[in-house]
Image: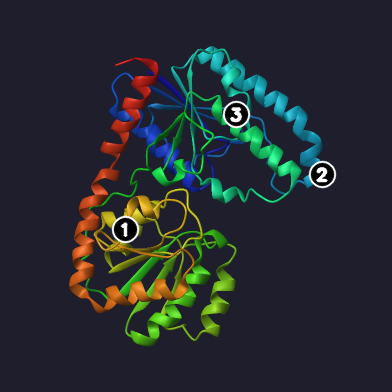
């Protein structure tokens, strides 16, 4: 089985780069007779941020759309047509040379022509966001046209892989979808005993992650439980905004902004509750990672992910999306009930096992073989 992944680059420390690298490495190392390629277009000679297995072959097309990042918007627009033609030509030539069994798109610029490349491969599209994240709607004719063309391109794939069952309801136009969730990437070798007086959250300091909502909720929590601490691990452009918000609400001692760490597993295990306050998600891997450490999650029921992962009152708690008071109430409920949070944490750990790569990898293997009729 010869598999080709495409994404723009591997040099950024993003979630897409992390998950593609992890899966490519796993397929190459664990599936017998699998040959795996990762194709990029603008690696610009930089080293991949996440290490690729020696068994994975990396090929760069050397067509830079976004690099250098400081180029003007006008320059990008003027140069785009020629760059796109060059990108399409090189991509087509490479696939026709490699003749893979499976080509997996991350649904970027290649998605509009990939189906027409006569290389003989099955074309799969991987969705790593939710349809809601595009902000479609309104009367903007150009946006509606863009959405229509986007959907038409998705229909031409042999299969579109979505991360959650909830997400399938957002694509009524498609009849070629399959659901395969993201695997847990962080090695889960420890478990929390859920006795520490610490709550944890993790993610980019961006609007999507809703840490401004979490900080507002924490101001309500700490009034009832002043001996508890919230630690938020992440980095990003909104860090100063959150610092100002924390100062304004008088939370300097109880709400701590921490930088991203490489051993987030140990930080989960130091905590007794995990909170996801996102406005939207593609999946929410941090939830399953926390569950894998036996930490019960409290989450907004945002689109998409939390409702697929968390059964309210069984392996975690769900709050109405964006409802700050309800999120605070759910956190307080677990703080006040040690037995409940420990029981939810135990069940969360049990349920996290279905997201281990051994199980997720098998789902991908079955999909590949069903589409190519190879076993």
Query: Element at badge 2?
Result: helix
| Quadrant position of the C terminus in the picture | top left
Are there few (<14), some (14-19), or many (20+) residues within 10 Å of tag 2? few
Q: Could you say which is closer to the camera, residue 256 or residue 113?
A: 113
Q: Are marks 1 and 2 in contact (CB under 8 Å)?
A: no
In the rendered image of this protein, does residue 237 appear above or below residue 257?
Answer: above
Question: What residue appears at the point 40 percent right and 71 percent down from the top-left corner?
Answer: 327
Mark 2 vs mark 3: give the one in front.
Answer: 3
Q: Are marks 3 and 1 in contact (CB under 8 Å)?
A: no
Residue 176 pos. (x, y %): 46, 28
In the rendered image of this protein, does residue 13 appear above or below residue 253?
Answer: above
Query: Element at badge 1?
Result: helix
N-terminal-most mark, 1 or 2: 2
Q: Which residue is mark 1?
A: 290
Are there few (<14), some (14-19), or many (20+) residues within 10 Å of tag 3? some
Query: Element at badge 3?
Result: helix
Mark 3 vs mark 1: give the one in front.
Answer: 3
Q: How is the image coloured?
A: rainbow
Q: Is residue 119 visible?
A: yes
Q: Which residue is mark 2?
A: 74
């Amino acid at each position: 089985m010869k598999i080709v992944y495409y994404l723009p680059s591997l040099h950024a420390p993003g979630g897409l780069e992390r998950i593609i690298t992890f899966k490519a490495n796993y397929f190459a190392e664990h599936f017998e007779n699998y040959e795996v390629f990762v194709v990029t277009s603008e690696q610009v000679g930089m080293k991949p941020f996440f290490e690729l297995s020696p068994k994975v072959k990396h090929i760069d097309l050397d067509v830079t759309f976004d690099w250098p990042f400081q180029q003007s918007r006008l320059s990008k627009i003027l140069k785009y047509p020629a760059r796109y033609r060059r990108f399409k030509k090189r991509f087509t030539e490479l696939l026709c040379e490699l003749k893979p069994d499976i080509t997996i798109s991350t649904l970027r610029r290649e998605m509009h022509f990939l189906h027409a490349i006569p290389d003989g491969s099955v074309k799969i599209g991987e969705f790593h966001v939710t349809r809601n994240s595009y902000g479609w709607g309104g009367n903007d004719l150009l946006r509606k046209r863009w959405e229509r063309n986007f959907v038409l391109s998705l229909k031409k794939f042999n299969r579109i892989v979505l991360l959650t069952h909830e997400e399938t309801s957002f694509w009524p136009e498609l009849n070629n979808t399959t659901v395969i969730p993201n695997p847990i990437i962080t090695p889960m070798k420890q478990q929390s005993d859920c006795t520490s007086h610490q709550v944890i959250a993790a993610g980019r300091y961006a609007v999507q992650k809703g840490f401004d909502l979490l900080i507002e909720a924490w101001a309500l929590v700490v009034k009832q439980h002043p001996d508890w601490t919230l630690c938020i691990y992440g980095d990003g452009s909104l860090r100063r905004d959150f610092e100002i918000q924390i100062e304004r609400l008088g939370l300097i001692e109880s709400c701590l902004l921490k930088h991203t760490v490489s051993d987030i597993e140990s930080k989960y295990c130091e905590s007794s509750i995990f909170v996801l306050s996102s406005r939207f998600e593609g999946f929410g891997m941090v939830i399953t990672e926390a569950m894998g450490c036996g930490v019960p999650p409290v989450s907004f029921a945002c689109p998409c992910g939390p409702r697929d992962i968390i059964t309210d009152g069984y392996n975690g708690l769900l709050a109405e999306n964006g409802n700050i008071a309800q999120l605070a109430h759910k956190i307080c409920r677990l703080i006040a009930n040690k037995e409940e949070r420990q029981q939810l944490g135990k069940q969360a750990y049990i349920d996290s096992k279905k997201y281990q790569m051994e199980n997720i990898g098998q789902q991908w293997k079955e999909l590949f073989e069903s589409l190519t009729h190879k076993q």
